Amino acid sequence: MASDPMAGRLSGRRAIVTGAASGIGAATAARLRADGAHVFTADATDGADFVADLTGEGANARLVESAVAAMGGLDTLVPCAGISAFHPLEGHDDAYFARVLEVNVMTVFRLVRDAVPHLKAAGKGRIVTIGSTTSSHGDEGLCAYSASKHAVLGFTKSAAAELGPFGITVNCVQPGAIATAMTAPAFEQMPEFKTFWENKAPLRRLGQPEDIADVIAFLCSDDARFMSGHGVWVDGGAMVRH
Ligand SMILES: NC(=O)c1ccc[n+]([C@@H]2O[C@H](COP(=O)([O-])OP(=O)(O)OC[C@H]3O[C@@H](n4cnc5c(N)ncnc54)[C@H](O)[C@@H]3O)[C@@H](O)[C@H]2O)c1
């Protein structure tokens, strides 16, 4: 059997992956482990090392503390937890809009803020945030989600500027339509939406969580050492048609 050429490239790395009980987060945790990293996972639902709703002050600080205790340090962050749903603008009440920002933006900000002292102590660091094609574009029914993902990309760029001098890179992966629990209800209720995305992508398919996880692992590796502050579309080419 051919050996995996990537095995060991993240050896010695110590990573937190949030949203790791499902979809892109689960695939990312598996990929980073396959590449040799020590991974501490977090999610609101069972199946993670740290099971908690990550919203609210304090949750991410507790996560960082637990991860550092378990791994002896920390140099890599992949805040992947997120929520999405289609709602017309007039159906966005204040609580819904605020919740989307709280989960998709505030948990990213707090995790990075609370973990950065450990990345600085490690003398190196990799942070890969998860944006979306809606970090750069809009779509019907996605005002709150798109606002949150634009914020994640903006946060990524400023964090890259601030943390670069400490040897920490910060990049944002922007997935297209990926087949996960997040998109399953929309694709089931609106099969034409699924067909639209399949046809929009020159590669003529939806993405799989592993398509995103493999790019995240690259950005966490030394191969990406001179990349920082970028939003990287991983969308089967869909956005060339936007
Ligand atoms: N699926 C797509 O097409 C797509 C496209 C672009 C971006 N993304 C982004 O990728 C990331 C992962 O999405 P996915 O498609 O794998 O979705 P998913 O629903 O399969 O996984 C999301 C995970 O986040 C966890 N989570 C949600 N809120 C949480 C909270 N408050 N505290 C802790 N954990 C919480 C969920 O329990 C779940 O396990 C999200 O940030 C999402 O916005 C997904």
Image: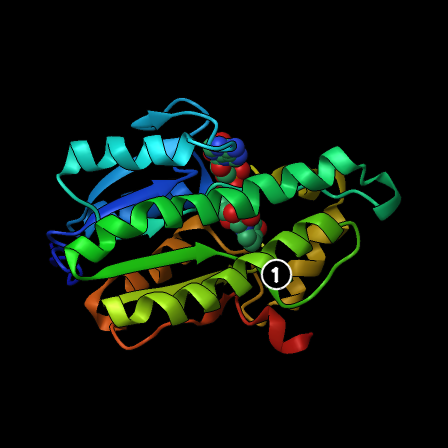
* Residue 224 appears anywhere in the view: yes
x, y percent for residue 38: 18, 43
Residue at image position (24%, 72%) is 225
Furthest-right residue in this view? 90
Mark 1 vs ligand 1: CB below 8 Å: no
- Which one is in front, 38 or 169? 169
Tell me the quadrant of the picture where the C terminus can be found.
bottom right
Q: Which residue is mark 1?
A: 150
Mark 1 crowdedness (10 Å alpha carbons): few <14, some 14-19, many ≥20: many
Residue furthest top in the image:
46
At x 39%, y 52%, the residue is 210
Residue 54 lies, with reference to residue 109, above or below; the image says above
Q: Nearer the viewer, residue 95 or 79?
A: 95
Residue 193 x %, y %: 73, 52
70 vs 154: above or below: above
Quarter of the image for residue 88 reads top right
Along the viewing direction, whichever of 107 and 87 lies nearer the viewer:
107
- Side (left or right) of 39 relative to 86: left
Please name the residue shown 55% across and 48% down the image: 105
Q: In terms of secondary structure, where does tag 1 sit?
A: helix
Residue found 34% across the figure and 57% down from its top: 127
Could one spot residue 180 in this view of the protein?
Answer: no
Residue 93 in percent (x, y) is at: 81, 37
Answer above or below: position of 137 versus 31. Answer: below
Q: Quadrant of the N terminus?
A: bottom left
Q: Position of residue 57 (x, y in %)?
A: 48, 33
Vertical position of residue 177 compared to residue 57: above or below: below
Quarter of the figure with residue 62: top left
Type of residue at label 1? Answer: His
